[in-house]
Image (tube, rainbow, N blue to C red):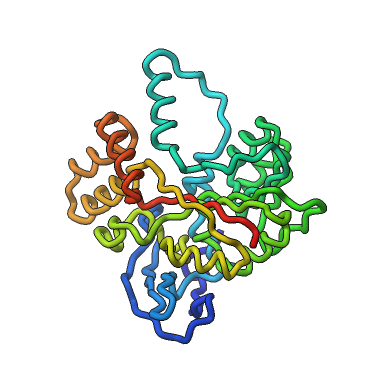
Amino acid sequence: MLSPLQVELEDVACPLGCLPDDRQVLIGRDRLHHLPGEFSVVRCQTCGLMRTNPRPTAATIGFYYPDNYGPYQSTQITLAATPQGPQRVWKRLTRHVFGKNAKQLPPLPPGRLLEIGCASGLFLHQMAERGWQVAGVELSEKAGELARSLGYAVHAGPLATAPEPTVPYDMVVGWMVLEHLHDPIRALRLLQRWTKPGGWLVLSVPDAGSVEFRMFKDAWYGLHLPNHLYHYTRHTLRTVLERGGWRMEQVFWHHNPRNLFEGLRYRCIDRDWEMAEKYMLAVIKGRRQRVARAVLGKCLGMLHASGRMTVWARRA
């Protein structure tokens, strides 16, 4: 495990090749694990793309991905008892409401699927049960090993070091992963080469064009510094996809209010409002205001204001 002193920072230009003309948007820190460091987010004045700069290098950013990193834990397959009665009904309802548009896929028959950032393999398992031939790429060796233990072909390491597929994929998916990549355009071109003509790319990313981002600034939950290296709006995401060889087809906003409540919780922490922070956490965990939370999530999604979006793109 790296120490804070071993984390190296690098200064990078806009990946779209714009002339150096950046404006600092904010300075933030790691709020998820409270690891040390302050990080600047800048906006390219030419294309509008925001990025974390300077940022940890690819070789040392693993310091900010501890083994208890949230996505590694939440994608493990467990054999917990099936909830019964009202609990079961509520679980199904919240999965439908909060999951709305989060992992919505094009209507394709089962084929070959690659998931980048597959973590511990839950989505791979779900798609395999639906008849898909699945493979994954995961940066974390420990999470990748959990996915491999399920019997799935998972490359543990950067996407750039993954082996070429022998048969192209029908669809590539990445749930909240594009913003983590050091070189997104190179990655998109690689995925384009690995996909069949007319194949699909499905990505979810935080929406930095949302009202939430302007409201919370450094306390925006979708900021997630320094793990998120790029901060996309609908416009800049379209531009990056096109440069990577993909044509954006459709955008869906998630029916999920978590970004909003997490931002409010972070602000409560900043102001030492302990009781208010605990209340917000109870709402996030579904122990308080469950119906109101579900209704709010639905409204935010319909208004394109949830701060989370999924895009469908096709190989150009």
Q: Nearer the viewer, residue 89 or 31?
A: 89
Residue 18 vertical position relative to residue 209 in the rendered view, above or below: below
Classify 97 as above or below 199: above
Residue sitting nearer the eye, 274 or 21: 21
Between 165 and 243, which is closer to the camera in this rendering?
A: 243
Residue that sits furthest to the right in the current view: 166
Residue 183 can be seen in this image: no
Q: Is residue 315 left or right of residue 215?
A: right
Quarter of the image containing the N terminus? Answer: bottom right
Q: Which residue is depicted at the point 35% across and 79% down?
A: 23
**Identity of the residue drawn at 35% across and 50% down:** 304
Q: Quadrant of residue 302?
A: top left
Q: Position of residue 5 (x, y in %)?
A: 48, 70
- Residue 162 in view (yes/no): yes
Q: Residue at x 41, y 48 (%)?
A: 253
Residue situated in front as seen by the camera: 146 or 118: 118
With 93 as the anchor, is 271 left or right in this view? left
Q: Position of residue 32 (x, y in %)?
A: 39, 52
**Placement of 21 over or under 150, stated as above or below:** below
Counting from the top left corner in percent of width and height, residue 200 is at: 63, 51
Q: Residue at x 40, y 26 (%)?
A: 93
Q: Quadrant of residue 256?
A: top left
Which x, y percent locates residue 316? 64, 62
Q: How many marks?
A: 0
Picture quadrant where residue 127 is located: top right
